[in-house]
Amino acid sequence: MYSYLGLFLCILFVCCSATPLSLIGSRRSILRQVRGNDKSGHPDYAVELNATNFDDILKDTPSTYAVVEFFAHWCPACRNYKPHYEKVARLFNGPDAVHPGLILMTRVDCASKINNKLCDKFSVGHYPMLFWGHPPKFVGGSWEPDQKKSDIHVIKDAYSADLLLNWINKQLDSSFGLDDQKFENEHLSSNISDPGQIAKGIYDVEEATSTAFGIILEHKMIKPETRASLIKFLQLLVAHHPSRRCRKGSAELLVSFDDLYPTDHWSINEQETDKGSVSNLKICGKDVPRGYWMFCRGSKNDTRGFSCGLWVLLHSLSVKIEDGESQFAFNATCDFIHNFFICEECRQHFYEMCSSVSITFNKARDYALWLWSTHNKVNERLSKDEASLGTGDPKFPKTIWPPKQLCPSCYLGHDHKSNKIEWKQDEVYKFLTNYYGKTLPSLYKDKKIVGNDGADGAVKDLVVEASNAIVVPLGAALAIAVASCAFGGLAYYWRSQQKNRKYFHHLHSLKNI
């Protein structure tokens, strides 16, 4: 059996190796970082595109719209227009974007030979030339001057920052201004009334995952006593994280974990040495975190953000597990928060609620409802503190979840005097499953970034015996290989390493990989 499986994985690896490594390496989720300064000292906010990354970046961006500027670096008019373009780009691009996640501002240098065919596809006849459209419409697309109907539009007569922003405002029926500052003049949509907004949370979950592991590395929190709990949580991420990027990154970290943090040899100096190696394994891709939040963005700079993103991650994991994984997920989550969440009061409160559980979770439904109830208890505690101290977010006050606007069928009764709610728990579970399990990753499914769900049952469970008595279902990466040939090489490497690993490996269900 193993020989056939090894042959199968080898074929996968060979197929995938046909893709040039340089192309794979160039694929990125989205460049959201300031590129440096131009000669005038102004930061570059617009994303530089070329023929090798054009489709990938526009395919993966979370932004709803895109502006593509075609220019030539030798063109005096282009050089003079750049400061105007950057004034608008700084509103939408970069870690300090005023209105993030709405418009991706990009540029392509047609004077570079690598972009000749790309510029020809869009019939670039003068410089600078600006196009507007939904990002996926640019992927593999083109534009001709005599086209009667096109999803890509030329932006005309917008050769100043004011004119360009006025053109954008007309398209979006918005009132953005060049003087807008972050968290000012915001018209944030409340997630209480818009159930579809959670779809934007997929990017926040990626950022929260990346931020959490950045904190772990920065504070040197991987120790002999915390090692096993991190492995278990990584297992959960490999099998059920809603982002394929994060599943892949978690699997890569897990594959190398024994080498980076061996059980038989441990020192602070070694941890310092390994930190560089671990940091190269970006758990959700090299362009995360992006430096801003979308669904979890507060109306004030110091509210929501990471804590919100982490809660969304935990809920999304809770509704994806199967019955047999419910106790494992409970233990992995409680241990992860206890060992790696550095807000002391919150950590202690969460761990107390974990310790008070006296039953074994045999059903995924029970664990998901426990986490939901726990989150409401946290909100209830924090809402009292925030009300007395004035530290809450006025746009997003802590409240019992879900509100009636989102799930009226969840409510059986509500005693307003005691503020006690009687819930229809079956309806609550149905809401949670749909909200965090289906709607949350819907943007990825629309963009075809989620892995193939048709791999269910393609590979039988594998159990590899070893010396430790810890059950760690590391075989989930094998499912990734089956779901996507892009992960074939990783799975091949994984299988070649399994003989020397020190854990029991158990393959999770493949349907979410």
Image (tube, helix red, strand yellow):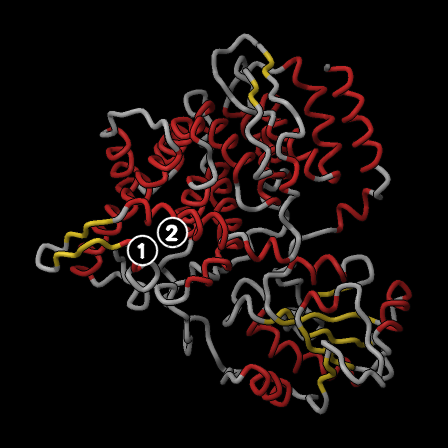
User: Relative to residue 503, is residue 42 depicted above or below?
Assistant: below
Which residue is at a point 19% across and 60% down the rendered structure image? 389
Q: Which of the 4 image quarters holds residue 318? A: top left
Mark 2 touches mark 1? (CB < 8 Å) = yes
User: Relative to residue 155, is residue 359 depicted above or below?
Assistant: above
Q: Is residue 70 left or right of residue 336?
A: right
Q: Residue 130 appears at what percent x and percent y?
A: 74, 80
Which residue was labeled with disc 1? 402
* Residue 16 numbered tag: none
Q: Amino acid at mark 1?
A: Pro
* Along the viewing direction, whichever of 473 and 77 lies nearer the viewer: 473
Q: CA distance from mark 2 to mark 1?
A: 9 Å
The quarter of the picture where the C terminus appears is top right
Which residue is at a point 73% across and 14% down the rendered structure image? 1
Q: Residues within 10 Å of mark 2 (few under 14, many from 20)?
A: some
* Residue 431 numbered tag: 2
Q: Amino acid at mark 2?
A: Phe
In this view, the mark in front (2 or 1): 2
SS label for mark 2: helix
